[in-house]
Amino acid sequence: MTGLDDEEYAQKGLVEPRYMGTLADRRDMNALGRVQVLRRNFRFISIVGFGCTLICTWEVILTLLAAGLTDGGTAGLIWGFIGVSIGFTLVYASIAEMASMAPTAGGQYHWVSEFAPKRGQKYLSYITGWLSAMGWQCAIVSIAYLAGTIIQGLIVLNQPDYNFQRWHGTMLVIAISTFSILFNTFLAKNLPFVEGLILIIHIVGVFAIIIPLWVLAPRNNAHAVFTTFNNGGGWDNPGTATLVGLSTTITSMLGYDCSVHMSEEIKDASETLPKAMMTSVAVNGVLGFTMLVTLCFTLGEVDAILDTPTRFPFIQIFYNTTGSLAATNAMTAVLVVTLTASTITEVATASRQLWSFARDEGLPFSSFFAYVSHVFFLF
């Protein structure tokens, strides 16, 4: 079979030898009782980009800023982010260790089937598989929703007479989700390259935003930034409000297990995956904290930006700082690009999780969902 070209391998439903991975990958697949049917074309940098761009920590902080400012304020956001980051880092360290032992696209449900008490292994694994598969499916539209409604916010800023309609946002969500699905269907072979490219935009984009803010925006008092808690939601006390506002920082650090579901497409997965996962956590943690502190020092009057007609305080902050529609559009466009890329990555993660669960016959019509067409990998 060494004489077959890539197209002939695809037609026979096989993976070309150059995409089979290392000997360690083959040993892992044998130990897991799995057959290699996906190409191992992800390397360290591309899988770091995969994790960083899917979670989009600093972008999510910007888009969900209103919730954190309303409940918690600047102090709640900053101290909450530090606490959440420490806690999640410990969680991801545990996940990385399990991924090094069993690098499978199934991820959590497979580990539950291995490590849970024998009496509950099958039941707990089945429940975990459904929660994970459905959770990732729902996550696709959550990111697409943020990207779509940000576009609406820009329209409001540029066209004050625009009538903000919810169904417009829904159509934008459908458009972004459809684009992401089509990309993953016909251009899956290019995904590692795209992830590396978006990683560059993701990192450079931070500086494209924070530099104008630091140069042009007025500065808030440091004491006020680090000690002022807000209770805009009318809770019993600021402590409760701050805990409610943690939804912003928790969401910004949630989901780095996404890389796990690409395990069977990573070369030397047992070693590369845990390192890449923890690198993604560190990179996004630093970028997120930098963006968060910058915003808290340069946002101006909290009540004024929360009342913005764009429905996104960060758009109003950009406009108040630069006084330019063009600059605001350019800075916001960075988020639209990275969040759209995040939706593409979400689809990739969700599809691998669903496929793996179907491969283990955890879904209705499992044979349909578990089928892998190698024709699309030729594009």
Image (cartoon, helix red, strand yellow):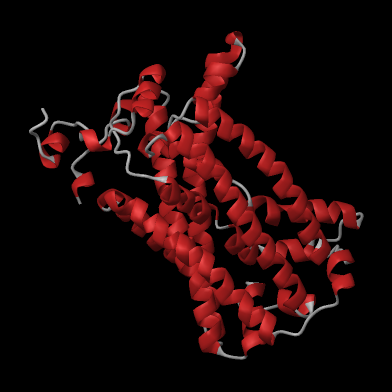
Question: x%, y% of residue 232?
Answer: 83, 65
Question: x%, y% of residue 289?
Answer: 69, 61
Who is closer to the viewer here, 297 or 28? 28
- Considering only vertical position in the picture, is 339 above or below 1? below
Who is closer to the viewer here, 55 or 365? 55
Q: Residue at x 34, y 59 (%)?
A: 179
Who is closer to the viewer here, 270 or 373? 270
Which quadrant of the view contains residue 306? bottom right
Question: x%, y% of residue 189?
Answer: 27, 49
Who is closer to the viewer here, 129 or 8? 8
Q: Is residue 14 visible?
A: yes
| Residue 365 shown left or right of residue 100 in the figure | left
Q: Residue at x 63, y 75 (%)?
A: 210
| Residue 224 shown left or right of residue 89 in the figure | right
Name the quadrant of the N terminus. top left
- Considering only vertical position in the picture, is 369 above or below 361? below
Total marks drawn? 0
Furthest residue in direction bottom, as rendered: 323
Furthest residue in direction right, as rendered: 237
Question: x%, y% of residue 88?
Answer: 68, 43
Furthest residue in direction top, as rendered: 119
Q: Is residue 155 visible?
A: no
Q: Residue at x 37, y 38 (%)?
A: 267
Q: Residue at x 61, y 62 (%)?
A: 58
Which quadrant of the view contains residue 214? bottom right
| Residue 60 shown left or right of residue 162 in the figure | right
